[in-house]
Amino acid sequence: MFPRGFAWGAATAAYQIEGGWQADGKGASIWDTFCQEPGRVFRDQSASVSCNSYELWEEDLQCIQQLGLTHYRLSLSWPRLLPDGTTQNVNQKGVQYYNKVIDDLCACGISPMVTLYHFDLPQALQDQGGWKSPAIAATFGSYARFCFQTFGDRVKLWITINEPYICSKLGHEDGIHAPGLQEPGTTAYLVGHNMLQAHAMAWHSYNTLYRAEQGGMISLAINSDWLEPLRPGCTEDIAATERCLAFTLGWFAWPVFVTGDYPEIMRRAIDAQSKKQAYDGDSRLPTFSKEEPAVLGTADFFALNYYTSRKIRAGCGTGGISMKGDQDVEEVLDPSWPISGVSWLAVVPCGLRNLLRYIKNTFNSPVVYITENGFAQVGKLQMEDVQRSEFYRDTIQEVGKAIQEDRVDVRGYFAWSLLDNFEWADSYSVRFGLFHVDFADTKLSRTIYRSGKDYAKIISKNKCMGKT
Ligand code: NOJ
């Protein structure tokens, strides 16, 4: 079912697995700071040590090999490389660490996919306004150029920013992710805008300075649920579903893939609400100016993080000045969908196929990489995690159908995650790994779950079939 050269991967992120939070000259990130504030994270835990991949990378490599992955998605810790966020001060130990990781992967025939930003902004930049400040785009641009220059001879798949939606909303609207700001209805839009600018700067740099020599591809990882109207024939629910898609997937995908601007539905809704609320300024949603780098066309492929689906019903206009108020929709879980360990993650493998078809039709048949998809366990952990194993089997089957029957150009699939790790505000209580990590033991030993073994079988079967 899968084409030759299909990327079979697993993904991780620096803050979630590395530990070594103060090792060898690393600077602090906003997550280091956030975890120190009581009440922010489950049991006030942090990822100061986590899986200690900073010291135990070779064990991770063994896990990667045991799965038979062709690709591994990792992220670079910006403050490990540039402790104050700027290229004026490079931490050579950080460079050495990632050089080793990338070299080891290449030596084993595993292609790295590298994310530049996965939620861990240098605290020094947060102190200057962080993602709220328009200056961040140029600073990110320099960081990106530094990474292309340093690692781009070996890295051919780049992600600039992971889940700008989550960074903007959870970090600046809801305040449940670092930097913990609760400024509803305004800051998330500003942060999202600056993230698009930052992404565009990085893409343009790659395109003009590095593409010819390095020949890689670069995109941003967009997360989206699959959404369907709760009452299929109801016009209000159909409109609400379109609105919700525009505010999530469309917020970042529309400017990059379709028009260079926000989706019309989003623009209209926020402008109207801003006017009604006598907002001091035109609209709470920023506008793209001619002085900013063009955002349209700044992705060489569509990078999708998919986890779950929702039914949507029209809201009742009571959301106030907030993203929720602007969208005016209610999300509902279909009672027939099984729930994984975490309440937000209903198991809906066919939602991925639907979303892939939607992406093909809406964004002009792009090349797609599924950069994350996974299933969580909570409570008593099962090493025989049959439900997760079935989740992967069924979801991968849906990807196969999207390729074969719907002709979606999917080139790779990355399971989240290689290892149990620090699941942000839920810390170690929520486990996404294909390998169990024993956080109570100083060795932090990694043990493959049943789902890991089964994923390895799927990979080996399909890799062989791809060759014939
Ligand atoms: C997406 C994020 O990129 C990742 O960091 C997180 O752990 C997973 N979702 C699971 O919630």
Image (cartoon, grey):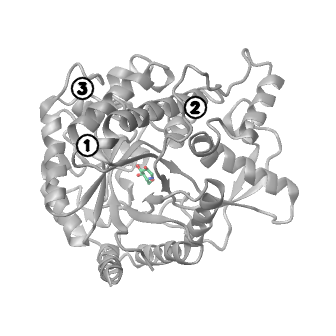
Q: Which residue is mark 3?
A: 83
Which residue lies most toward the front here? 212
Q: Tell me the SS state at disc 1.
A: loop
The quarter of the image holding the N terminus is bottom left
| Camera-nearest residue between 354 and 182 | 354
Residue 244: x %, y % from top left = 70, 48
Point 81% across, 23% down: residue? 275
Between marks 3 and 2, how big is the CA–CA gap? 25 Å
**Which quadrant would residue 370 be assigned to in this image?**
bottom left
Point 51% across, 59% down: residue? 306
Q: Which residue is mark 1?
A: 152
Residue 2: x %, y % from top left = 42, 76
Whether residue 191 is visible: yes
The quarter of the image holding the C terminus is bottom left
Looking at the image, do the residues carrying marks 3 and 2 touch, with CB atoms under 8 Å apart?
A: no
| Left or right of residue 124, residue 135 in this image | right
Q: Earlier in the sequence, mark 3 or mark 2?
A: 3
Q: Which residue is mark 2?
A: 188
